Image (cartoon, rainbow, N blue to C red):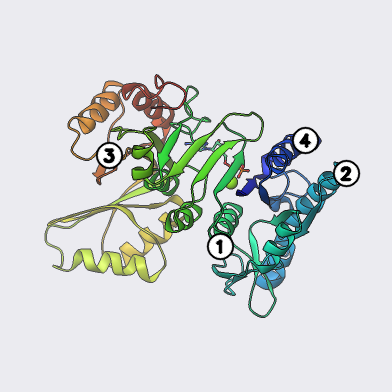
Amino acid sequence: MELVVQKFGGTSLTDEQSRSHVLRHIIREFAAGSKVVVVVSAMGRSGDAYATDSLLELIRRNGDALAPREKDLLLSCGELISAAVLCSLLLAEGIPSVALTGGQAGIVTDDRYGSARIVEIDCARVHRHLTAGEVVIVTGFQGRTKDGEITTLGRGGSDTSATALGAALRADIVDIYTDVDGILTADPRWVTNARPLAAVSYEEICNMAQNGAKVIHPRAVELAMKAGIPVRVRSTFSDGEGTLVTHAQALRSQGIWYDKAVTGLAHVRDVTQLAVTDLDGPADLQLRVFRAMASHGISVDFINVMPTGVHYTVAENDAPLAVELLRELGFEPRVRRECAKVSVIGGGMNGEPGVMAIIVEALTGSGIPILQSADSNTTIWVLIPQKDLAAALQALHTAFGLHLSPVGGN
Ligand code: ADP
Ligand code: MG
């Protein structure tokens, strides 16, 4: 008997109509004889009554007065509502089901309220309900500490709940249901002709997620990868197969994937580039700069270290503090605000000649300057002015023929 974990995101649960689609997917799986564990997010997005952002809005004026413990109590409510409502829908259809909080489902976390990490999962109770023939609905995004306190896992936490439960239960598959047809070649809000991919490797989607593709949380992918549990990202609103995510080797052996040089694009906005050049400066200039950033919790990216100085980027929010710190060190950095980082990602990029040439040609051909670049075995990053982001994504998408890939992308 198959054990399937299905995760439904906020947009899949927004209203009665979308919940009827959710119900359809659960019932299909249950009727096929699978054991089904359902992980739910809070209903809807910012502005919807029970969405996580709307709950936060309730304490906007006095949120700072609330201790993190109590803030997590509030934040955990959205998923509770989803779980109970979904349970009522299943019971009304005659499907035996039970709703559990993350804690009741055995998810134990540390006590970092707001961004807790899962330390263990005791699956006994979930197994008991599954064995009794029930669909088990679990609130995503949350767990409990050893002392029984409710914690939340941070943004993208429901994805993490789903793959962590999948790993602990040794599920056959974790299905991440969302509002798009799968993992697309680029963010569809920016590239209108982005296409769904039939399959990607864990490494590729991890790269995409870490570089800004919000379709699945990178921590969730890492957990699935470690446990070797396949994941499918698919649409709640259609019956498509979605995108299969598993080990590159497994994809190759199934003959459904080959090592394409470029699989997809991802991007991060609101980046500031800082350049510190001081020909006569201290020998330990680089060290001093990065120590100052690290000691203030500013994460740095796109680092180019040269004998005469350093170039790097920080998130726009961190830029004022970063500049202040550099000035305190006696440097006058060159500051370039409103940049975006575009990532060109492909598991088969390594050793494939000409990828960088295509990128340069596509961007400069569209009059877009490349402010900085870097590369690894599977990714080439370019920094560009943010105002050119849409044009850059579209130009690269076209240059690599990503719009042409047959649905399935292979
Ligand atoms: P959910 O509520 O289901 O968790 P999310 O908003 O977290 O939904 O994730 C789905 C969204 O991710 C899509 O609506 C899409 O706009 C965005 N997205 C960004 N990059 C990609 C990509 N490469 N492929 C698919 N979706 C992407
Ligand atoms: Mg999400």
Q: Residues within 10 Å of mark 2 (few under 14, many from 20)?
A: few
What is the three-letter code of the residue carrying label 1? Ala
Placement of 193 over or under 153, stated as above or below: above
Mark identifier at residue 168 = 1
Real-space Cα separation, disc 1 to disc 2, in angstroms: 30 Å
Residue at 43% x, 28% y is 390
In the rendered image, the residue lying farthest to the front is: 1
Q: Residues within 10 Å of mark 1 (few under 14, many from 20)?
A: some
What is the three-letter code of the residue carrying label 3? Leu
Q: Identify the mark nearer the N-term, 4 or 1.
A: 4
* Numbered disc 4: secondary structure: helix
Q: Identify the mark nearer the N-term, 2 or 3.
A: 2
From the image, state whether disc 2 or disc 3 is nearer to you: 2
Mark identifier at residue 371 = 3
Viewer-side residue, 83 vs 64 = 83
What residue does disc 4 label? 20
